[in-house]
Amino acid sequence: MQAEINVGTLGHVDHGKTTLTQALTGKWTDTHSEELKRGISIRLGYADVSVYECKECGEFSSSEKCACGKGKGTLKRRISFVDSPGHETLMTTAIAASSIMDGALFLIAANEPCPQPQTAEHLMILNATGIKNVIIIQTKVDLVSRERAMESRKEIEDFVKGSVAEGAPIIPVVATHGVNIGAVFEAIQERIPTPKRDTEAAPRLYVSRSFDVNKPGSEIAGLQGGVLGGSLTQGMLKVGDEVELKPGIQKKEGAPYEALKFKITALRSESDKLDKAGPGGLIAVGTPLDPAITKSDMLVGSVIGHPGKLPEMVESVGVKYSLLERKDIDNPPFKMAEPVVVSVQTATAIGVIVNLAKGIATIKLKRPICVDKGSKVALSRRIGQRWRLSGWGSVV
Ligand code: ZN
């Protein structure tokens, strides 16, 4: 069974995103050794879970057997959690993650004053990308007094005033002990409905992960083709479909990008083999591609669809934009020749502003992207050593 929605987790580093995802799904999303070493989710981690409602007590959980011991759960929906990095230099990855979120859990720890720097930046991302279905999770309430927990709640309410998260529920949890996890599931069921998806349209799958699944030292004869992970925003893909992936790869440096054409060899949700996949949740696409070109997220930001049905590859992009009003940093108007990072769908590309007119920035990109007109864009600029979110808009 395929998940129906992607629920993102956002919030400051150390505010307990991975612990919460584990409490919700029973899985640890930090599966990469590098991530384990650094204790942060460098790439988008994800885990699928089924949500059940107990027939007896009405409690929601990820288990068919309710903790009350009396009831059997009714399966309500399957959802994918998208864990995104809280590390500040990886803000652009969080923006990419937000492009495939149907709603978000926004984590704010009770034991620190609100907002912490990344809490503020992640709220800007929610605002810029227009994710309205937000649930605020107040974490680490077991580390503070009742008074501090109430004070923290007040800080959170003040902080989200005027944003997309204004009026969002604020659910206190103790993720390490599973306290109030049922309330989180209930809020997800109420606040993040499954959007209407167009399954008849030409498929569009935005690649958010790309892997080599072979163990080092595997025999050539036993090698598996590269695997791509992502979400369909529209249409269906079937095993055996001839597809194209754009912008594709460069055969050598300086050469033009060439689309990759291949036949889908397998489709999977996190736990199941699928014959066909539609929008909602994250899916893995098996390919006959050389794993050398899919390893280490090399194809993240690509789009997959039926041949001839994908948008044109572009090397420069026009963005109708607004500047963010930032209280924490100086964010003056963009300048000609200024380098920016363009985040659109799951693609992230560095570019330079080559024209500014009538609220539209034309940006020449270092590598091409493939996006539909109207797609939401986040623009980051270099401030000191970091790329900071400074504007948002849409592709014209
Ligand atoms: Zn029950």
Image (cartoon, rainbow, N blue to C red):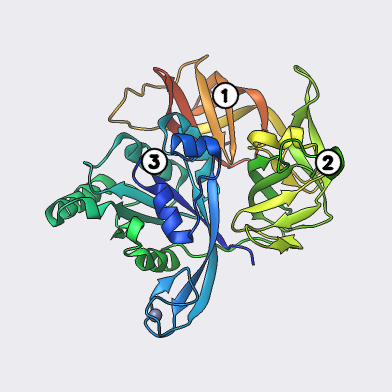
Identify the mark nearer the N-term, 3 or 2.
3
The residue tagged 2 is 261
Q: Amino acid at mark 3?
A: His
Q: Circles 1 and 2: CB distance less than 8 Å?
A: no
Q: In which quadrant is the N terminus drawn?
A: bottom right
**Dot 2 crowding, Cα within 10 Å, few <14, some 14–19, many 20+:** some
Between 100 and 150, which is closer to the camera in this rendering?
Answer: 150
Q: Position of residue 42 (x, y in %)?
A: 50, 37
Q: Residue furthest top?
A: 337
Between 286 and 257, which is closer to the camera in this rendering?
Answer: 286
Task: Give the Cα distance between marks 1 and 2.
Answer: 26 Å
Q: How many marks?
A: 3
Residue at image location 43% in from the left, 63% down from the top:
188
Residue at image location 30% in from the left, 52% down from the top:
139
Above or below, comparing residue 194 to residue 42 in the picture: below
Q: Position of residue 305 (x, y in %)?
A: 75, 47
Q: Secondary structure at mark 3?
A: helix
Q: Amino acid at mark 2?
A: Lys
* Residue 396 can be seen in this image: no
Q: Position of residue 83 (x, y in %)?
A: 48, 47
Q: Secondary structure at mark 2?
A: strand
The residue tagged 3 is 122
Q: Amino acid at mark 1?
A: Ile
Between 102 and 30, which is closer to the camera in this rendering?
Answer: 30
* Residue 217 can be seen in this image: yes
Residue 236, quarter of picture: bottom right
Residue 241, quarter of picture: bottom right
Q: Which quadrant contains ligand 1?
A: bottom left
**Dot 1 crowding, Cα within 10 Å, few <14, some 14–19, many 20+:** some
**Dot 3 crowding, Cα within 10 Å, few <14, some 14–19, many 20+:** many
The residue tagged 1 is 350
Q: Circles 3 and 2: CB distance less than 8 Å?
A: no
